[in-house]
Image (tube, rainbow, N blue to C red):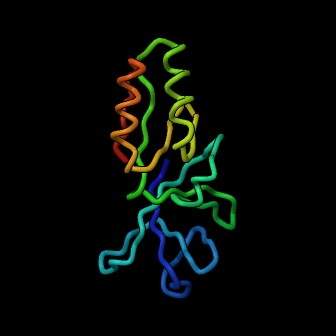
Amino acid sequence: MNIYYGFENNLESFPFVDREGDFIITEYCFEDSNEAIPLLLIKPYKTSLLLEDYGFFSESGKCYLYLDMICAFSVKEGDQKQIEMFLLQAEEELIAVEKETEAIYFFSQHNKLLILKWAKSYQVKPEFILL
């Protein structure tokens, strides 16, 4: 997962690594720009329809999430059956899942307290990842 920055309607002003229409994606956040939108590049193996509200696939097929709008966690402890039930419950709010070494689940930042409530109910310990 890498952090990038998006800018709207600035095709000529900055060197960019990716784009989606008039939205360009750069590796740098220029100090004098208040227009930068922080993005998290992920390699999801699963996405939901909610992705459209919290991110997008670029013209090159890469998946970016709006960093300020999401939270991410992995499951650290819990009985396997309880973990499965927890994830089944959480599926309705799921944005995406990335799995390189361990599964990382992406949700709306607004759902963080709900996720914690579900985790407590299923006796599962999620570990939120600082992005």
User: Relative to 60, does residue 78 appear above or below in the rendering?
Assistant: above
Q: Quadrant of residue 94?
A: top right
What residue is rendered at 59% in x and 61% in y? 56
97 left or right of 127 in image: right
Q: Nearer the viewer, residue 114 or 17?
A: 114
Q: How many marks?
A: 0
**Direction left: furthest residue:** 31
- In percent of width and height, residue 92 lies at 56, 41
Compared with 124, 94 (above or below) is below
Q: Compared with residue 111, is residue 37 higher up or lower down, i.e. above or below? A: below
Give the residue displayed 42% in from the left and 36% down from the top. 73
Q: Nearer the viewer, residue 121 or 67?
A: 121
Residue lying farthest right?
60
Report x, y in % for residue 106. Answer: 49, 43
Decide if residue 120 is on the left or right side of residue 100.
left
Residue at (51%, 43%) from the top-left corner? Answer: 93
Q: Is residue 28 above or below residue 74?
A: below
Identify the residue at image location x=52%, y=14%: 80
The spot of residue 114 in percent (x, y) is: 38, 38
Q: Nearer the viewer, residue 89 or 76?
A: 89
Q: Position of residue 131 (x, y in %)?
A: 37, 48
